[in-house]
Image (cartoon, rainbow, N blue to C red):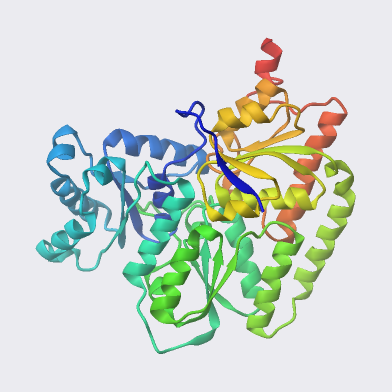
Amino acid sequence: MARIEASGKPCVINPLKVSPPLGAAMAFMGLDGCMPMLHAAQGCTAFALVLLVRHFREAIPLQTTAMNEVSTILGGSDNLERAVLNVTERAHPKVIGVCSTGLTETRGEDVRGDLKLIRRRHPELADVALIHAATSDYKGGLEDGWGAAVTAIVEALVEPTPARDPRQINVLAGSHLTPADLEEIRDTVEAFSLTPIMLPDLGGSLDGHVADRYVPTTLGGTTLDDVRAMGASAVTLALGRQVEPAARLLENRCGVPVETFPRLVGLRAWDDFVAALSRRSGEAAPTGVRRRRSQLIDAMLDGHFHFGGKRIAIAAEPDLLVGLSQFLADMGATIACSVAATSAPALTQAPIESVTIGDLDDLERRAAGCDLVVSHAHGRRVAERLDIPFFPAGFPLFDTLGAAHRLSVGYRGARDLIFEIGNLFIANQSGRRPRDRQGGHHAAVAAR
């Protein structure tokens, strides 16, 4: 069991953490017809919007309450009301997801109470779901904001029901899962003749498809009817510790039992997931699933020579860090350095003696002599300065094409990870270092 240690520095030098409001906004984007809204200044929203656009390379619906100096001091209820009414009039959303920020949380804004008053004063909002996620910038990170938004969605929309559909299951997805991962999960669940309700479903809204028409809100994702029907499901599968509170809320409110899967990357992890689907459906794994498992085993046999003994440095959000670390350890690599953006109980399961809660500066100080650096796009410069191969993972990935289509879960995803990371090791051993995505060969090293 890994120890969780603070870096002990008085300040952040090279940030690793991504803010909770951005994580909550991402979760709301997994709802169909939704307009996420940051209860913040325009600059805060603009910065979040830039990161989302650069990562997904899609049109991102995101609005702001445009707080200023006066409203920050006197209260932002008027700004919130004007923003909700303007968005409703112009975009006609089915859902408005309001994410509070450090600006409003520090003052102690009663956002939930404000939304109730706004709804009471404006009957035209009767058909619009107003959902508030309390996400202060100074507490937690991306996964925490995502989890808070999923919990808020369940709390606002799911009601108890005496009905039960034995073939319907809830799948609560964590922020570490890409749209491609969610598609793989959906396809696997449906292969067992089960009907999944995915929440949030970025695989339907941010999977990179070209829409037939312009829609100012999210297009695709979990519908409100599906969310409201979650209380009639036979089981809830919580994919990541970050969504377990939402799953437990659903269990307490509707009596839907919960099964938690801390990770889905690697042979053993996906075997557990497939076994759970088989138990729930009463069916054996389909031929296609069995064949992909066989392909993964062959890839593990081919690749373990290149992973064995390699020293890995990884910096990421907790659920992503644990999943990738355990996968790499299963392949024979050693996790020599592990830095998490925020503290979480899941980190105790990382295959390393200790996990540091810190930033990319902590990663750089500890990663010297490693064979691979794993982090989001901002970690690339760390790898260049240390002259170590780099594997991008997490959010944001603004210098990588196809971030939404990268598959890591399931037998196919693990197979692809083995090939991609293994090829990095092969290229480094043969002296053919990978070309930098900006066009040069490790520009920082060459400059020296």
Residue 117, compared with residue 399, is above or below; it is: below
Residue 237, compared with residue 447, is above or below; it is: below
> Residue 138, how many percent across, how many down?
37, 41
Which residue appears at 75% of the width and 76% of the height? 286
In the foreground, 132 or 181: 132
Q: Quadrant of the N terminus?
A: bottom right
Residue at the far bottom in the pictured view: 162
Instruction: Examine the rendering and report whether any part of residue 212 can be seen.
Output: no
Which residue appears at 64% of the width and 51% of the height? 322
In the foreground, 295 or 385: 385
In the foreground, 366 or 377: 366
> Residue 184, how many percent across, how many down?
64, 62
Which residue appears at 88% of the width and 28% of the height? 430
Q: Report whether 330 appears left or right of 282.
A: right
Q: Report whether 139 appears left or right of 170.
A: left
Which residue appears at 45% of the width and 64% of the height? 245
Q: Report whether 78 appears left or right of 202.
A: left
> Residue 409, how many percent across, how many down?
67, 57
> Residue 360, how many percent across, how many down?
57, 31
